[in-house]
Image (cartoon, coloured by chain):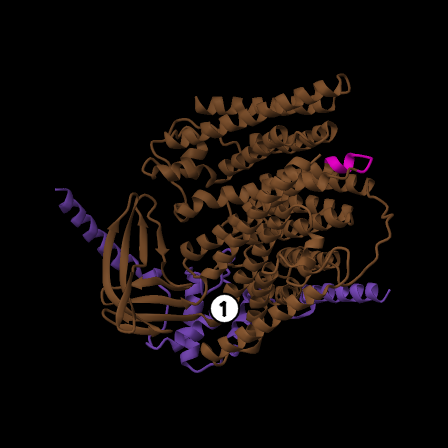
Chain colours: A purple, B brown
Amino acid sequence: MHKKNNFIKIFFFISFFLFFSAPLGHSVSENNDGSLSKSIMEIAIELKCLECEGQNVYESNSNFSQSIKAYISKELTRGTDSRDIINDLHQKYGDEILMTPPVQTNTYVLWILPFFLLSLGFFIFFHKLKK
Amino acid sequence: MIALTGNLLLLFALLSSIATLFFAKTPAINEHKKYKFACLFGIFQFLFILFSYFLLTYGFVVSDFSLVTVWQNSEIQKPLIYKITGVWGNHEGSMLLWLLILSICLFFIIKYDGKIPKHVQLNTIAIQTSIIFAFLLFILFTSNPFALQLPIPIDGIGLNTLLQDPGLIIHPPLLYIGYVGYSVLFSYSVAIMLENKLTDNWARWIEKWAYISWIALTLGICIGSWWAYYELGWGGWWFWDPVENASLLPWITGTALIHSLLNYKSTGQHRDWTLLLSILTFSFSLIGTFLVRSGILTSVHSFASDPQRGLWILIILSFFIFFSLFIFLRNLQKESEKKDFVFLRRGTFILINNYLLMVSVVVIFFGMMYPLLLEAITGDRITVGPKYFNIVIAPLVILIAILMPIGPNLSWKDNWTQLAVKRLMISFVITIFLIISMQLVIYENADAFHLLLISLALWIFIASIVDLLPRNLSEFRIEFSGLKRKNLPIIGSRITHMAFGIMLFGIIYASAYSENKDLKMNLGDKIQIDRFELQYDGFGTHIGENYDDLQINFSLIKDDKKIANMTPAKRFFRKSGDITTEASIQKYYFDHMYITVGEVQEQFIYASVSYKPFVRFIWLGGFLMAFGVLFKTIFRSKIFGTTNA
């Protein structure tokens, strides 16, 4: 009795999965050597999922990320360069979509500070050493 | 009933903390009595909070849904272990755990630090109690775990499915012991600063707390990273996520603190800086809590956030930070002793270490906060992701790695010794030899940058071992003369340094040489990855306690021999309907084969397969680091336990 119950459960469970799991998957490309999906990954990892909290497009399965991944896949098959795809998306969604902030007026401080502090350390060190 | 008792217990705890503060500060009675009563009520605080914590756990175990917290985060069907540990799987319960650890620390201060002068002790108890008091108010007014609701619902909403995992059992408590352990250092430091005359032994009083907190924080971070690695299903172990950064910042300042304490103990220099570090470390624990709980920074694992809570924590943290900084500045000792700055001294290297660690703290904190600042000022929205942190932290890590083995070989007082030069040369030669042979045997063409980093990791590892070997050479006995056991703590710190090398090696190797494939696979398909083949064998099911798994079966094949079955799964939680992706991880020596499955259809699946060489070194190194410090802590207390005044 118990076994039969389990069987029915499993049956429903599997059917459920086959039915519902489709939207969960990564939208990975069709070619089997994984080369296209690799370039999708390389691009998607550079983009932030704007719907999520702190995830990139590659990791996330939100609608936004799905559509971006589909877009990347489409553009790549058309032969667009990775750099251009990222630039297009950057144009469309703004700086926020780039996981790594571009070096520009409003991020100079962000990029310079670490290296400034490091050089400051060197400076102090050698100054003290001379004394 | 539970709600009422729980509220009463918290109220009693609040009253006891007021009583402790009163007795610690009242001028009416003599010191002996003050101390006695303050301790008594301190222990009362601990007991009341402990009982309230047990009561909440009981509420979770019997599924008392009249408690809002239990209703929101539990359900009848949930496995018992997650009912008990689920207490800290939510905001209210975890704050109660935070409070419990604060009061346990108070208990330890009262019970085991009896050799410290009474007036310092009294101040420490008062400061620790005021932290407890602030968090009690916070819990009672904004996050009461005993909030009542009527009518009582039949079943609860259930615990977030990602949290129903063994990782939850130990990760948060360890992390909290780390965070909160630093509150003791904070309390002692402020109490020491309140002393007008110089006290000499304080570094030894607080040393063990610095070690214990650091061990707990290290283990907590390691387990958290391991949990993210296998549970989140992306195969990453560090995401530079705000919550992770929040735990990394006190870890870094805590590391700087340990080194600075060593320096102070040996040379008596940089007293103020050491005290400031222990204040900073706890401040970063508070700031981290604030940022995460207030929802100011969003992260993959944020709690349900509430601006009002954020405001409260902001008030608490500003109060304690400004209060301690005020006392710090008031008691700042005019650096009277003339410090001679000699390059090849251990103390100098510890200063350099501290500088580099503090730069990393500033950089990480700034990187975390910059998008917020920018948006507040200009309205521009940017994202500061992992790559930024990797780029700016890399030079710091490289410098640290170069210098790390040199420092411990130097003397506190004398100049550069012949022996140190010999040791470092030996280590250097072995490192070069190993890296060349590794290059020849395993990977013919690695890029220069990763090669440099790997050699640095090896350099740390080898130098730490070489440093341990000739411990009995007569030259070295002069410096470490006296107790022979005095050498044991040194072994502990070399283990820790060595372990850092191991961790660094794992991090770099796994990021540089991982192979990653996203594939569509039909039944029976075989793919090649690194030296392995992976075959898709179909799917099956597994019935869990409150979930069902759809397992995808793979065979891992090496040299035409099947070496393992791998079953990544889609986990379906019956109650909530949530589906989580369960990765399957197969270890091969120190490497991992890591599989997650995306879409599943009758004929084919989408799988993401990675081969991560030496990835296990990351956690091995992390745990070994904690072990090294534990080793040091144990033998330190044996040596100084009797001589400690």
Instruction: Give above or below for B238 relative to B22.
Output: below
What is the chain letter for disc 1? B
**Outermost residue to the bottom:** A79
Q: Report x, y in % for residue A76.
A: 43, 78
Q: Report x, y in % for residue B225.
A: 49, 54
Where, quadrant-wise, is the N terminus of chain B in this rendering? top left
Tell me if I can see residue A87 in this picture.
Answer: no
- The magenta stretch is B191-198
Tell me the residue at 62%/22% (across/down): B41
Residue B473 image-quadrant placement: bottom right
* Viewer-proximal residue among B632 and B160: B632
Mark 1 = which residue?
A: B509
Instruction: Give above or below for B225 relative to A33.
Output: above
Q: Report x, y in % for residue B378.
A: 68, 59
Q: Secondary structure at mark 1?
A: helix
> Which residue type does callout 1 highlight?
Tyr
Instruction: Give above or below for B55 relative to B612.
Output: above
